[in-house]
Image (cartoon, helix red, strand yellow):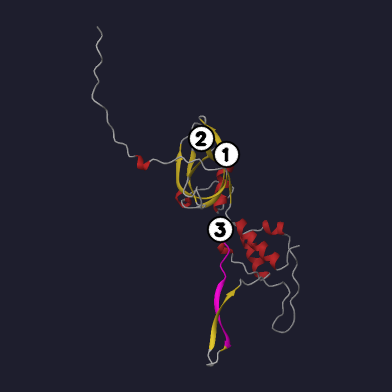
Amino acid sequence: MARRPTRGKSRIITVDFSKAEDRQLVDEGEYAVKVVSIEEKEGDKAPYISWKFEVLDEGKFEGATLYNNTSLSDQSLWNLRQMMECMGFEVERKATEIDLDEMIDAELGVVVTHEDYQGSPRSRVSGYFELDEPEPEPKKVTRATRGRRDGKAEAEEVEEKPARASRATRATRGGKKEKKLEALDSADVAEMNESELEDIVDKYNLDVDLEESKTLRRKANAVIDALETANMLA
């Protein structure tokens, strides 16, 4: 007669599930995210960088986690370059040292789509875009208004709008006008280097601070916008 096998000592382990990450399915669409961790790993064909993002948009997906990998193979470096440019970094077309820690907390926009993973849908980062830079808030200044009955002037808080770029033709101290400057083509401005953009800002007296823009492309866009405001685009 067969005997029942005796059960051995129970194998009990302790697992801390408070550290387990939720793999939330984020709806397809565009999201503002920030980089929270970066790891360099070895792949089957080439090394790659593993990215972890946190969704910044308010709503049900705020704080959700998204993942992305960028291969370091020569054929796939365009993907890493595009993502870094959308973070605001200038990427030169040459061998470049990259400080991964410098990109922690960097913000960018990502496009999320769904893919099938072992029979279930999974969020996938399929594209990137630059986030719009916030518009500067108008300054508040105080000016004196009409006098009160007691003879004291009241103070009124008014909104000071950002100064508009001056037009190319303006009066000089001697009462003469400077020679009218030539209107520029936006495509030509977009191809300029930083030194050339600085010359345009000075020459056309544009209200642009190039140091506020991180990338050369953003600097050029700021100059183009100011030229358009001054009616100096061809």
Q: Does residue 100 appear left or right of residue 112 in this picture?
A: left
Three-letter code, disc 3: Lys
| On-image quarter of the C terminus | bottom right
Give the CA distance from mark 2 to mark 1: 10 Å
Are discs 1 and 3 less than 8 Å apart at CB? no
Dot label at residue 76:
1
Give the CA distance from mark 1 to mark 3: 25 Å
Label 3 residue SS: loop
Looking at the rendering, the stretch of residues picked out in magenta corresponds to 133-146
Q: Earlier in the sequence, mark 1 or mark 3?
A: 1
Q: How many marks?
A: 3
**Residue 136 image position (x, y, % from top left):** 57, 66
**Residue 156 image position (x, y, % from top left):** 55, 81
In the picture of the structure, the residue carrying the numbered disc 3 is: 214
Give the quadrant of residue 124.
Answer: top right
The verdict on residue 37 being magenta is no
Q: Residue at x 61, y 58 (%)?
A: 218
Q: How dense is the environment of label 3, judged by Cα within 10 Å: few (below 14), some, or many (20 and up)?
A: some
Are discs 2 and 1 less than 8 Å apart at CB? yes
Is residue 143 shown above or below 202?
below
Q: Earlier in the sequence, mark 2 or mark 1?
A: 2
Q: Does residue 19 appear left or right of residue 141 in this picture?
A: left
Dot label at residue 46:
2
| On-image quarter of the N terminus | top left
The verdict on residue 140 being magenta is yes
Mark nearest the camera among 2 and 3 is: 3
Which is more toward the observer, 42 or 221? Answer: 221
